[in-house]
Amino acid sequence: MFNQDKFAEKAKEMLRRRENLTFLLIGRTGVGKSSTINSLLGEEVAPVGKYQPTTLEISTYQHKHGDLTYDIIDTPGLCDDLPEVGNDEVYLEKIKSHAMNADSIWFVTKLDESRLTSDEKRGIKIISEALGPNCWDRSIIVFTRADKADDFEEDLKQRTKIIREEIGKYCENHASIPAIGVSNSNPILPNGEKWLPELFTQVFLRFSDHAALPFLNSMEEDIGAQKKHQEEEGVERERKEQSDQREDRKERIELK
């Protein structure tokens, strides 16, 4: 039988124990991992290179929000050379220990690529082999460059499908991996939605129980602010509709 008091006490204990949550970003070189971190933190903390890879070591960036500290881990880009050179093995060895303790793993790739490249296939394969297929159970797919897509909704649908299918070669639960489009140049997606709240929603849904409650607690003020903003927008829309109706009635009277 469900005991509300015991549940509340357990939740409080979990919140007391957790002081930080860890997000780990992984993917090919040049897909926008560092840019996404800069967008999340609202400042240029992770170096970004247009022509050459800039993240060659593991870098951790901390962000305090509510009662929690977020450790956001940037990792070297995979598939930046020929397989025989061996950079990927070096990078993945560095990534392994961080991935084991990560609460959420973000597989970052581009939305404005129509086909699954050989590098993409290779990246998914070596991630699955190095970190184990269970790593996908706490992962989300983050598509950068959402603002560059020809048809955002259709591209998101099709890219999600082919990435999931490739992951499915190594993980049975691939169909449940959430996917989200982000833009590192605009907080609004082409469909008019803000991508950051949707990103956090998908992260929360993939969290294990021990991480979900602290995360939700730290976002409580944001959720309240978002709700208040939505209510204010609703009131404003209602006022505009009433004003338009008054103007319409006035015009009809003047025509008579």
Image: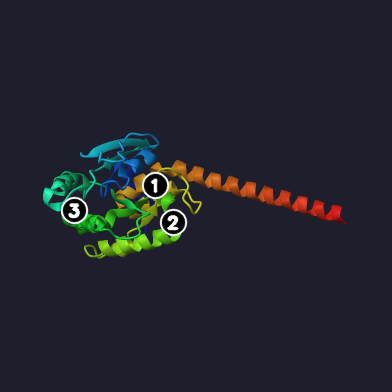
Dot 3 surroundings within 10 Å: few (below 14), some, or many (20 or more)? some
Badge 3 element = helix
Query: Where is residue 163 drawn, in percent x and y?
Result: 30, 60
Which is more toward the observer, 231 or 92?
A: 92
- Between 94 and 84, the residue placed more toward the observer is 84
Q: Nearer the viewer, mark 1 or mark 2?
A: 2
Residue 84 in the image: state x and y as whole percent: 11, 51
Depth check: give the residue in front, 106 or 28: 28
Q: Quadrant of the C terminus?
A: bottom right
Label 1 with label 2: CB-CB less than 8 Å: no
68 shown above or below 128: above
Mark sitting on residue 216: 1
Looking at the image, tell me whether mark 1 or mark 3 is earlier in sequence order.
Answer: 3
Q: Residue at x 43, y 42 (%)?
A: 185
Position of 157 with respect to 61 (left or right) is right
Q: Which mark is residue 139?
A: none
Residue 50 position in % (x across, y down): 31, 40
Do we see residue 184 in this rendering?
Answer: yes
- Quickly name the residue at label 3: 131
Q: Residue furthest front?
A: 51
Q: Is residue 92 left or right of residue 188?
A: left
User: Based on the displayed image, in which of its 4 quarters is residue 43 positioned?
Assistant: top left
- Image label count: 3
Write down the residue under mark 2: 150
